[in-house]
Amino acid sequence: MMDPEAVANFLSEQRENAPEDLQQSFLTIEDYWDRKLWHQLTDVLVEYFNTPDSASQRLPLFRRFILSFSDKINQLKFVSLGLLAASQCSDGHERLSFLTDLTKKVNKPASQDAYVYALVAASDVKLRLQDLAGARKDLDSAESILESFDSVETEVHASFYRTNASYYQAKAEFGSYYKNALLYLACIDLKSLPLEDARSRAYDLSIAALISDSIYNFGELLLHPILDSLNTPEHGWLRDLLFAFNRGDLNAYNVLEDNISKAPLLDEHKTFLWQKISLAALTEAVFRRPPHDRAMTFQTISQETKVQPHEIEILIMKALSLGLLKGSIDQVAEVARINWVQPKVLDMKQIDNMRLRLKDWDSSVNQLGNWIEGVGKDVWAA
């Protein structure tokens, strides 16, 4: 614990260096510290550190003042203050050293949530320094601890998923990036994201969804409000492309195809994108048919998907292996018999097709009822 007189002198010095409209905060800080009101002191410090004009004072306040009573305050808030202070370090190496010390300080049985919070922050810096192996090791440790918790503050989970997503993005593992990025968005208030950050996240998620070889159903993204941030002349084509893939719309894909060169990653995967939209067109063709009419000839599938006839069998086998469809192939008769298609999010046109199918089903049920009534009159009479 610092000497009271030294604290008073230090806070007085910091108050004089602070912007005029923030100087009152130091009188409050000194008062709470003097009365040992640790909870109130922590809250006013968090509020002060979150003020942009406090940037130059965060490191000295943390090192010369907050560390002196760090064991008396909420450890998660202590780490939050440390992260705000770390943002003022001169470079990544200094920041990593600062966060490593912070991580060690909160690595106690009673403050494992704070430890995870600090550990993830350190791994984020390692990612920026291109130490992917070190970042992965820290993230694996953090994940193991998180799984042992019954509950934890959402800011800790959000931090983990955001950094984990960044790791997978750096490794070009798009399926894992997509999953963790969506989990991150589930942990935050979307309104807290600046518009440019939201647009950047939506762009990256859209690219990952399209080029991942493990994601063929991205309804969760299509329904997410973050996608609205792409409603701009510059990025609107990407949003439209996602919806075209969802409904297997080859005509829309052909219209939007020229935009693919605007995104280098999409351009690199152009052949794969054609294969993926062909699979989407196949599943959509099956979905549009009633369950009793899903024995489709290769020729019919070729007409509806625009895939060459000699490639149809491979296309169906790919869909079956990915779990998009279930059924069998008669290679001799060149017929695919499908008995299940993977569910997906429907747009308004697809919902209308579903409505028409339900009407057809209702009509069939009525016809069957009338037939049974007609042929069974004697039975009913008896």
Image (cartoon, helix red, strand yellow):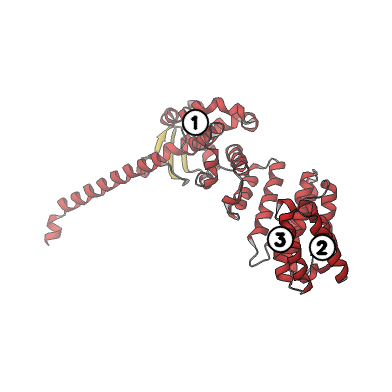
Residue 196: x %, y % from top left:
62, 41
Residue 14, quarter of the rendered image: bottom right
What residue did someone put label 3 on? 46
Residue drawn at x 82%, y 46% as measured from the top left: 92
Q: Work out whether mark 3 precedes mark 1 in sequence or the reverse, and give the earlier one.
A: 3
Q: Is residue 170 above or below residue 47?
A: above
Between the C-alphas of marks 3 and 1, the distance is 62 Å
What residue did someone put label 2 on? 11
Residue 10, quarter of the rendered image: bottom right
Residue that extends furthest to the bottom in the rendered view of this protein: 35
Dot label at residue 197: none
What residue did someone put label 1 on? 312
Q: Nearer the viewer, mark 2 or mark 3?
A: 2
Residue 87: x %, y % from top left:
77, 50
Q: Is residue 47 above or below residue 265?
A: below
Q: Nearer the viewer, residue 17 or 324?
A: 17
Q: Can residue 137 be seen by looking at this rendering?
A: no
